[in-house]
């Protein structure tokens, strides 16, 4: 079945120059394998489309039940150069939580 990522995880995001940083953290540790399987660098890049001009790199943090993404060339030049409403990338984590992922009913039932 499909759910929004935000049903099993929360996110924090920020920036460094023109690079956005998004941390995705599972609410429950047993959902971490679902994050690893479903929230790939390729899917994150596809989700953001033309907003991310550069590559997306994913780092796995199993001890935290989290993934960290670096989105290069994602902020229109960065805070002082960009005309974007969110040139620092603070809302990108919230946006990513709207991404749909596949999850087995049994995986989701564990959280109930």
Image (cartoon, grey):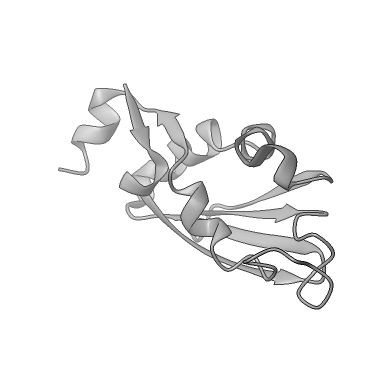
Q: Is residue 8 visible?
A: no
- Residue 36 horizontal/vertical position (percent): 54, 38
Q: Is residue 60 visible?
A: yes
Q: Quadrant of residue 78?
A: bottom right
Q: Residue at x 32, y 52 (%)?
A: 28
Q: Quadrant of the C terminus?
A: top left
15 relative to 22 in the view: left or right: right
- Residue 85 horizontal/vertical position (percent): 63, 66
Q: Residue at the bottom extreme?
A: 80
Q: Residue at the front extreme?
A: 83
Q: Nearer the viewer, residue 35 or 10?
A: 10
- Residue 82 horizontal/vertical position (percent): 79, 67
- Residue 15, compared with residue 36, is above or below; it is below
Marker count (numbered): 0
- Residue 60 horizontal/vertical position (percent): 62, 50
- Residue 62, compared with residue 98, is above or below; it is below
Q: Residue at x 68, y 71 (%)?
A: 88
Q: Residue at the left extreme?
A: 112
Q: Quadrant of the N terminus?
A: top left
């Amino acid at each position: 079945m499909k759910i929004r990522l935000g049903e099993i995880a929360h996110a924090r995001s920020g920036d460094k120059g023109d690079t956005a940083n998004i941390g995705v953290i599972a609410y429950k540790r047993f959902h971490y394998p679902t994050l690893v399987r479903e929230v790939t660098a390729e899917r994150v890049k596809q989700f953001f489309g033309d907003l991310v001009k550069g590559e997306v790199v994913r780092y796995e943090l199993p001890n935290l039940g989290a993934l960290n993404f670096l989105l290069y060339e994602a902020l229109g030049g960065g805070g002082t150069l960009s005309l974007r409403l969110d040139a620092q990338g603070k809302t990108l984590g919230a946006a990513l939580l709207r991404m749909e992922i596949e999850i087995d009913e049994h995986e989701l039932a564990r959280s109930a």
